[in-house]
Image: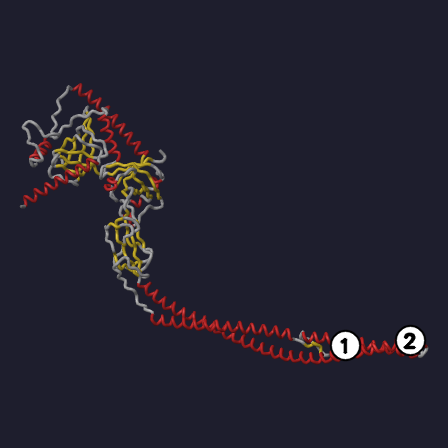
Amino acid sequence: MPSKNKDQEILNNQNLDDIQDNDVRENRSDTRFYVPIIVTINSTDYMVSDWSAGGFKLKHFDPNFQVSDCFPIHLSFNFKGGIKFSLDLQAEVVWRSSKMRAMGFRFLNMRASEKELIEKMGNDIQNGKLTPEEPTINSEKVATQQAIQQTQTPEETQPPKETQTPEETLIPEKKSQPRGKRFWLTSIGLSVVGLAILSATGVALYRAIAYLHIDSAAVARSFKEVVSTHRGKISQLYISQGMEVTAGDPLLRVYDEQIAQFIAEDDARNIQQRIRDKRQELDRVQEKLELTRSELQKAQENLRIARSRQQREIESLEQAKQINQKQLQQAQAQVQALETQYETAQKNLERVKFLEQEGAITEQRRDNAKARLAEIEGKLQQAKQEVEIKENTLKSIEQGKFYTGERFNGDLPQLEAEIEQASETIEQKSRDINIYQRKIKQKQQEIQQLKQQYQNQNFQFPKPMLTDPSEENIFSQVYEAPVDATVSKLKKTVNQPVQMGETLLILEPKRDQVMVDAFLTQDQATRVSVGRKAKVTVPDLDLTYQATVTKIDRSGGLRDEIRGRYQFDGSTNRPAYVQLRLLDTTKEDQRLLTPGIPVELTIKKTDF
C-alpha cells in the first residue's frame, strides 16, 4: 500500500511539473539562444543548448532536484581561439517535466549589467560576431553524471549505448590542431572576444551612467481604509480577513453605550428644559393677562366717567336750550310788538305831517311824532338783534356748545369721542383677555403633557446586539464596503473600543491596473520626472514590462503600516517614494503580478 501511494504522489508531481513547465514557457520574455554552454551545478558539469539571460533548460537532470530548489551555478562560455568567459550566479528550479526529462532554471539576484552582458553575448553569437567552441566536460564529472542517470527510472532515461554518451551530457574531445594555426586562431579569437567584451563593457558603462537601476521596488497594493466616524465598541463583525466583499456589503457595526447614555440623559434634560421654557412662557402670558385686565378696568372707568360727563353735558345743554328758546320767543314777541308800534308811529307821523300842512297842528307835534318813530325804530332794531343772538345761541346749543355769560360750555363731541375710544379699548382688551386665557390653558396642558412624558420616559439603552445588518438605531452604525474588494486586515475585533477617526479595517480593492512602488534616494529622485518611461523587470516571473512614472514624493516616502510590509532593507536611506503604472497589462498579467512581488526598474535619467 505505501508503494502505491508513493507512485500516485510521483504521478501527481509529474502532472504538476508539466503544468508548471507550460506556464513558465508561455511567460518567457527573454530571447532564447540554442548554442552550447557549460553549466556547473553541485560540482557536476552539464552542457546546455537552450538558455537566455533569464535562465536555462537542463536535460538529464539529477532526480533529486525539485521545484523551488536553489543552487549556486557556474556558467562557462567557450569561444574559438581558446577564450573562455564565466559567471557565478544563483539559480532556482521553476519547473520540471518528467515526460520531457527536463527542468527549467531561472537566475536569481542577477545584476542588470550581468544580464545585459549575457544578452549581448547571445546576440553576437547569433549574428556571427562571436563563434562558440564546443565545450568539453571533465571526465570525473562525467562519471558522476552517468552514475546519476543510471539511478533514474526507465521513464526518465533512455537505455545507454556502449559507445555513446547521453545526449547533451558528454562532449567529444577536441581534436589536436597544428600549433601555428592554433596560435593565429587564438589571436583572432582573443581580438574578437576583446572587442565584444569592450563593446559590452561600453554598453554596460553607458547604461550605468545614463540609467537608474532600482531594485528597491515591488508591485504595489491598492488599499482603502475604513475609518470610524463614531466612537464606541465593535458589536458585530459581518466579515473575516481574506473575505471578498461587494460594494454595499455590511462590514461591521459600531455601538456606543456612552452616546446612548448621553442621549438618554440629554432627552431627560431636554424635557425638563422644555417644561421650564413652557412655564416661563406661561408666566409671560399670565403677566400680559393681568396687564390687559388692568387696562380693561381703566378703560371701563374712563367710559363710565365719560358717559357721566356726557349725561351732565346733555342735561346742561337741554336746560340752556329751553332757556334760550324762551328768550328767543320773548325776543321774537318783542320784535312783533315793536314792528306794530313802528307801523303805528309811522302812520301817525304821516298823519301829523298832513295836519301840519293843513295848519291844523304845530310843528312841535310833528317833531314829537318823528322822534317817537325814531325811538320805536331803534328799539325794533335792538329787538331783532336780540332775536338773531338767541337764534345763534340756540344753534350752538344744538351743536353742544353754549355761553353761560361766564364761560362757554359744550364738551359733548369730545366726550362722545372719549366714549367711543374707551368702548373700542374695552372691546380689544376683552378679546386679548380671551386669547391670553386660551394660551394659558394651552401652556398648562403642554406642561402637563411634558411632565407625563418625563414620568413615562424609558431611559433604558437599546440592545447593542442587532443580528440583522439592516436593523438600525441612533446608537449604532453599520459600516458598508465602499468598493468591491478583499478584506486585507482587521484592525479591530468584537467588543474592542473604537475612537473616532480610527482605522477599523483595511480593504484591498480589485485592481484595474498594476502599480509599482519604489523607494529611491534623494539624489535618484532628482533624476526622475513624472511621465518618464521605465522598464520593469519581474525576476521571479522572468517578465518585462514598460511603465510610466505617475507620482514622486520626496517628503519622506510612504512608511505607514499599510506600505511598511513592502519596505526594503535600508529603505530609511531611500526616503523618496516613486510610483509607476505598468502599461498594457492583461488580466493574466494582473493575476501573475501579485502585490508585494519584488521588481527591478530601469529608468533613463532626466539629464540624458
Farthest residue toward the front?
Answer: 358
The answer to whether 350 is drawn above or below residue 192 in the figure is below
**How far across and down, in percent of the image, does residue 190 sit?**
22, 24
Farthest residue toward the right?
Answer: 359
**How far across and down, in percent of the image, does residue 378 sit?**
83, 76
For residue 102, say whether it is visible.
Answer: yes
Q: Which residue is rendered at x = 88% and y = 76% of the image?
A: 349
* Of the pair 446 and 331, the residue shown nearer to us: 331
* Of the pair 375 and 540, the residue shown nearer to us: 375
Q: Secondary structure at mark 2?
A: helix
The answer to whether 485 is drawn above or below residue 399 in the figure is above
* Residue type beneath disc 1: Glu
> Which of the labelled discs sits on residue 386, or is there none?
1
Q: Earlier in the sequence, mark 1 or mark 2?
A: 2
Local crowd at mark 1 within 10 Å, few (<14), some, or many (≥20)? some
Task: Place residue 606 in its image quadrant.
Answer: top left
Local crowd at mark 2 within 10 Å, few (<14), some, or many (≥20)? some
Query: On the rendered image, what quadrant is the C terminus found in?
Result: top left
* Residue type beneath disc 2: Phe
| In this rendering, position of residue 19 left or right of residue 338 | left
Q: Secondary structure at mark 1?
A: helix
**How far across and down, in percent of the image, does residue 404 sit?**
71, 79
For residue 88, say whether it is visible.
Answer: no
Task: Place residue 277 in its image quadrant.
Answer: bottom left
Coloring basis for residues: secondary structure
Q: Which residue is rendered at x = 76% and y = 79% of the image?
A: 333
The residue where tag 2 is placed is 354
